[in-house]
Image: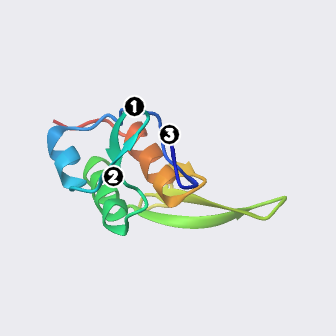
Amino acid sequence: YKVTGVQTCALPIPMTAAETHALGERWIAAGGGWAPDFRDPATLGAALAVVRERTDPLAYVAPYWSHPGPTLHYHVLDRDGHSLGRGDSEAAALVSAIEAAPVTR
């Protein structure tokens, strides 16, 4: 789905109940259901925390420019600089990393 120009993901995002709770109370109606409000900085921080729990405690989001363009994109990287996810927005990159990482129970 798309929220005010912020590309995110297809619903549902595979998450445990604890991870869903960690994303907090900032949910919006989207795609016929409810989804985290990725326009909110606290939600982005919580999504990064989920990525870190599933992959690497030192994972981070980094912007990069692609050419021709230039166009701004985002990567979620582990401590060694390997890509865990990428997208056209910080939210899309985080969701991509969450979707690619195994769900821990």
Q: Mark 3 points at which residue?
A: 1
Q: Which residue is drawn at 47% across and 44% down?
A: 96
Q: Earlier in the sequence, mark 3 or mark 2?
A: 3
Residue 58 visible in the current orientation: no
Viewer-side label of 1, 2 = 1
Q: What element carries label 3?
A: loop
Q: Residue 47 at what x, y percent from top left?
A: 33, 55
Q: Residue 14 at what x, y percent from top left?
A: 32, 34
The residue type indicated by label 3 comes to: Tyr
Q: Which residue is drawn at 44% across and 34% down?
A: 31
Q: Name the residue under label 1.
A: 32
The residue type indicated by label 2 comes to: Val
Q: How far apart are marks 1 and 3 (CA)?
A: 10 Å
Q: What element carries label 1?
A: loop
| Left or right of residue 23, residue 36 in this image | right
Q: Distance between the residues labelled 1 and 2?
A: 25 Å
Residue 105 occupies which quadrant of the picture? top left
| Left or right of residue 82, residue 52 in this image | left
Residue 32 visible in the current orientation: yes
The residue type indicated by label 1 comes to: Gly
Q: Is residue 94 above or below residue 41?
A: above
Q: Mark 2 points at which residue?
A: 51
Q: Please say if the residues under marks 3 and 2 sit with CB atoms less than 8 Å apart.
A: no
Q: Residue 21 at what x, y percent from top left?
A: 17, 49
